Image (tube, grey):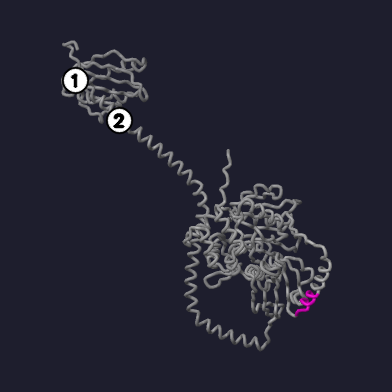
């Protein structure tokens, strides 16, 4: 069988993807072109554009259009414990193996890649809490939840869900892990702190390492073969030996049997094989030109001086390289947050300071992407019975045009005095009074929000159903068209045959009707199949009275007993019998003499044809 050739790339689409990558840092070039092109064209049509170049002009002048386009491309369909059978297998069979492979009290690292609005990450938190108990889970389990969609991540970080979203959970689990918050439910705060949300592109960014469980469900299906291969390489690097990989129903590791062992193919659960080599990530070597030694010594002294100055800075400062690796922690940061020099060189996302007292990873991503400083004021940090407040500044460091070469995070202690706290409390009471005045307006907004949320849930349900059937419809459409053409051809042939049969039937009926003598056709079981006009005139029985009736059971003027032997001989010999002369009484009661000729009938199920004709014995006819 010949393999169909791949479709030629659309230059307009490729140019648009390159523009999106360079302008916003979203690299969709690894996505399947059929799916990606269809979604981009849908958004272009909705925006009133039919040409890629015109739509690019719109993106250059309208920043909000990027957000709408990304929401169209990145379909976020998820739910708590989606595909119950797969999660049951993971919880009952796989999770005990994961826990058995980790030393008692050891850290358990989990990554939910493509977490969308967070249901999958919180499902993992619930699963581990049920297996270990909440207290042990808080001490040991760390769940990284990443996605490229900032809007989905904002929703995930809030941990707020409508009651309908929690329907997959039992009442016991819902009451144990969620608290009522107005018309919504919020995930319990202590476990929420163990789930670290951040923006991450699995096609470009360095993977999270030393994982015990990696969950990436129905995300690989959107990428082409080359991108999928690179992603699986990253996943293999991220997993420790015997670490587990949990994929979606639409995904499969067909060519990685040497690196991944299939635990359950139906539910898409795999385990990294022990001893399999992993893809390494090495930095590019530094190029040294002649005469560079003195410059390096001078640069080294300048760098040491800068390090000493930064180390003496009264504010806590942490510096990261473009890959998110910690390259500097000053003295104040080490003493303030319990860090050590050994933490330098580690991924920032592995440090507790990256998510406590506030989620910083997403701020670092946003600051680097937008190339601007971000500030978070009055962040609360509880240290035992002491309450501290910090202003946090995330600042990208650039050496010229292009991406920043580093990012600094500065913590300024703004812990208020007792008098200032009292003033803040007074202002807070005034704000609470104003809040009560705005309560009625807020209730109206909540009602509107619930209606919008209900519409969104219905659209998500419809979209999921359409997503699952769309490709099937596209696949079968051409088959239906081909079958329709064949049916039309067959219909034309049947119409011609019907016309021919109608003409043949009319001709035969004309021939049979034109025979003056009585013509009777009997089937093999001696039932009447034809009774012509001549027979009606002779005996007075209509055709509808005798059809399918046994011939020898009919009561009419012709004695049928003498014909029984003749008919049997005719059927047995297959030859026409000699005429048989039988006295009879016609339909008006007049005595007549009939000549009956019996011929074999070679039609359906055999039978005979009887030709009955009145004769005049006196005249010798």
Residue occupied by mark 1: 585
| Viewer can see residue 52 | yes
How many numbered marks, from 0 up?
Answer: 2
Q: Residue furthest front?
A: 291
Discs 1/2, front: 2
Q: Which residue is drawn at 50% across and 82% down?
A: 437
The image shows residue 206 at horizontal and vertical percentages of 69, 60
Quarter of the image for residue 283 reads: bottom right
The 10 Å Cα crowd at callout 1, few under 14, some 14 to 19, many 20 or more, is some
Quarter of the image for residue 149 reads: bottom right
Q: Would you say 220 lies left or right of 459 here?
A: right
Question: From what the image shows, is residue 302 above or below residue 43?
Answer: below
Instruction: Give the mark nearer the N terminus: 1 vs 2.
Output: 2
Name the mark on residue 550. none
The image shows residue 446 at horizontal and vertical percentages of 49, 73
Locate the N terminus by quadrant: top right
Quarter of the image for residue 315 reads: bottom right
Labelled pair 1, 2 in contact (Cβ < 8 Å): no
- Depth order, front residue of 444/320: 320
Question: From what the image shows, is residue 566 above or below residue 394?
Answer: above
Question: From what the image shows, is residue 46 above or below residue 370?
Answer: above
The image shows residue 581 at horizontal and vertical percentages of 24, 14
SS at mark 2 in the image: helix
Q: Residue at x 74, y 68 (%)?
A: 326
Part of the protein shown in magenta: 305-313
Residue occupied by mark 2: 503
Identify the main secondary structure in magenta: helix
The 10 Å Cα crowd at callout 2, few under 14, some 14 to 19, many 20 or more, is few
Q: Which residue is drawn at 26% across and 24% down?
A: 511
C-alpha distance separating marks 1 and 2: 37 Å
Locate the C terminus by quadrant: top left
């Amino acid at each position: 069988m010949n393999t169909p050739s791949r479709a030629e790339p659309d230059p307009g689409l490729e140019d648009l993807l390159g523009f999106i990558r360079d302008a916003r840092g979203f690299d969709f070039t690894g996505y399947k072109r059929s799916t990606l092109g269809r979604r981009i064209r849908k958004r272009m049509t909705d925006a009133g554009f039919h040409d890629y170049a015109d739509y690019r002009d719109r993106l250059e002048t309208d920043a909000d259009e990027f957000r709408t386009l990304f929401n169209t491309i990145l379909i976020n369909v998820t739910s708590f414990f989606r595909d119950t059978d797969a999660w049951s297998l993971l919880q009952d069979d796989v999770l005990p193996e994961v826990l058995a492979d980790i030393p008692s009290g050891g850290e358990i690292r989990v990554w939910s890649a493509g977490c969308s609005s967070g249901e999958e990450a919180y499902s993992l938190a619930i699963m581990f809490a049920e297996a270990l108990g909440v207290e042990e889970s808080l001490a040991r389990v760390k769940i990284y939840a990443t996605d490229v969609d900032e809007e989905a991540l904002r929703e995930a970080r809030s941990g707020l869900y409508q009651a309908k979203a929690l329907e997959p959970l039992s009442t016991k689990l819902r009451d144990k892990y969620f608290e009522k918050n107005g018309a919504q439910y919020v995930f319990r705060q202590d476990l929420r702190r163990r789930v670290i949300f951040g923006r991450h592109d699995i096609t470009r960014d360095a993977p999270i390492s030393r994982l015990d469980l990696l969950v990436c469900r129905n995300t690989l299906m959107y990428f082409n073969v080359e991108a999928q291969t690179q992603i699986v390489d990253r996943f293999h690097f991220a997993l420790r030996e015997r670490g587990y990989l949990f994929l979606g129903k639409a995904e499969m590791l067909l060519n990685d049997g040497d690196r991944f062992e299939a635990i359950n193919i139906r539910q898409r659960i795999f385990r990294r094989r022990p001893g399999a080599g992993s893809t390494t990530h090495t930095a590019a070597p530094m190029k040294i030109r002649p005469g560079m030694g003195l410059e390096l010594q001078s640069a080294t002294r300048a760098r040491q001086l800068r390090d000493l100055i930064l180390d003496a800075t009264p504010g806590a400062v942490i510096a990261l390289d473009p890959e998110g690796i910690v390259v500097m922690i000053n003295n104040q940061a080490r003493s303030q947050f319990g860090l050590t020099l050994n933490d330098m060189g580690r991924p920032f996302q592995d440090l507790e300071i990256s998510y406590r007292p506030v989620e910083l990873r997403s701020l670092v991503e946003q600051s680097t992407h937008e190339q601007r400083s971000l500030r978070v004021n009055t962040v609360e940090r509880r240290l035992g019975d002491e309450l501290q407040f910090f202003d946090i500044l995330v600042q990208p460091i650039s050496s010229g045009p292009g991406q920043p070469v580093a990012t600094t995070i500065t913590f300024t202690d703004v812990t208020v005095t007792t008098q200032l706290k009292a003033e803040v409390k007074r202002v807070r009471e005034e704000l609470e009074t104003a809040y009560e005045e705005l309560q009625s307006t807020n209730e109206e907004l909540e009602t509107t929000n619930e209606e919008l949320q209900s519409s969104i849930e219905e659209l998500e349900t419809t979209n999921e159903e359409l997503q699952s059937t769309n490709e099937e419809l596209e696949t079968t459409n051409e088959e239906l068209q081909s079958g329709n053409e064949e049916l039309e051809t067959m219909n034309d042939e049947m119409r011609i045959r019907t016309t021919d049969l109608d003409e043949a039937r009319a001709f035969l009926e004309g021939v049979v009707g034109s025979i003056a003598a009585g013509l009777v056709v009997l089937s093999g079981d001696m039932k009447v199949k034809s009774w012509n006009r001549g027979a009606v005139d002779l005996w007075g029985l209509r055709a509808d009275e005798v059809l399918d009736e046994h011939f020898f059971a009919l009561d009419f003027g012709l004695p049928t007993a003498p014909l029984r032997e003749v008919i049997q001989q005719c059927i047995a010999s297959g030859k026409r019998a000699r005429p048989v002369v039988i006295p009879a009484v016609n339909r008006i009661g007049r005595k007549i003499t009939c000549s009956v000729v019996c011929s074999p009938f070679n039609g359906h199920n055999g039978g005979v044809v009887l030709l009955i004709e009145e004769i005049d014995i006196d005249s010798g006819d």
